[in-house]
Amino acid sequence: MDASAFHIKDELGFCTRQNDGVSGMTVRALSNFCGLAIGSSSAISNLLTQIEDSDPETNNLPETLKPLAGQRLRLETNEAQGSMFIIDEVCHAILEYYAIDARKYKGKQVAIRNYRMVARAGLRVFIWSQTGYSPQSVSSEQLALLDCIPTMQQEIAQLQSQIQNLLPPSADFIPPGWNEEVWRKLAPQDKRHFRFLYRRRGFRPSGQGTNEQLALPPVTTEQLKQRQRAEFEQLVGESSAQEKQQLEAAKQQALKQLWLQGEQDDTDVPF
């Protein structure tokens, strides 16, 4: 059968044939589902071989496995990975065997729990078949929720980004834009400083790879003065009306004292 007729989740060990819904599990997936220890997939493989080689009429298989004697139990998909899947009905019978008939082993409770879960799900599907319910029918509320998923994913990504910015960076974190060799040469306090600048202001260096250790843009004295004046004007602009009045009164008082001092100096000059 063509591989395109199957919906395969090979990383999980499951597959479903799309034309009739027949499904299967890999040996490893079934082994985990039955609670067998990691690396014990050979137990499932040996059991499958024993079932396939058994005579349908005369065999010593457990009661749960007798109906499968002599049958082909594997589902061939011919997909690229070449995986072999065990048919779902066989998986259920083997799970029942490990949950009920097999002697006690370390993971038996896992098999029992999964067997009960499958039984509940199977009963629900049976009732659906009687009532005509189809799980593929989607209500208007469900459609509205599906439409919201992209927006919710975007909001989640934004929240993750904000949380990441709140978390302290790791000791070996290199902010984006830094050459690794240049970064390694920085003093520890400089590294902390530039990590802070990146987190708070998104600072990224430019012109790296030169002889300078730090790739910072040059600043002239005049530019520094302009920045200081701008900061002072901003501080004055942020002052309250009362503070501005007090500043203006102090300035007028200083000018008055300077004027009086000038007049006194004029009277003291001998002619």
Image (tube, rainbow, N blue to C red):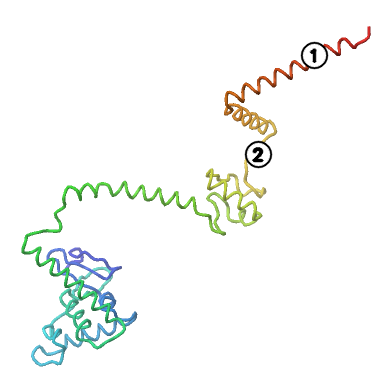
Question: Looking at numbered disc 2 in the image, what kind of residue is underneath it?
Answer: Pro
Q: Nearer the viewer, residue 254 or 90?
A: 254
Report the side of 183 relative to 93 (left or right).
right
What secondary structure is found at the residue carrying circle 2? loop
Decide: is 106 above or below 234: below
Residue 185's label in the rendered image is: none
Task: Tell me the CA gap for discs 1 and 2.
Answer: 47 Å
The x, y position of residue 145, in whole percent, is 24, 49
The residue where tag 1 is placed is: 260
The x, y position of residue 186, in whole percent, is 65, 54
Decide: is 117 above or below 56: above
What secondary structure is found at the residue carrying circle 1? helix
The residue where tag 2 is placed is: 218
- Mark 2: few, some, or many residues within 10 Å (few <14, many ≥20)? few
Report the side of 58 relative to 217 (left or right).
left
The x, y position of residue 3, in whole percent, is 20, 66
At a point 61% along the width and 49% down the height, the residue shown is 193
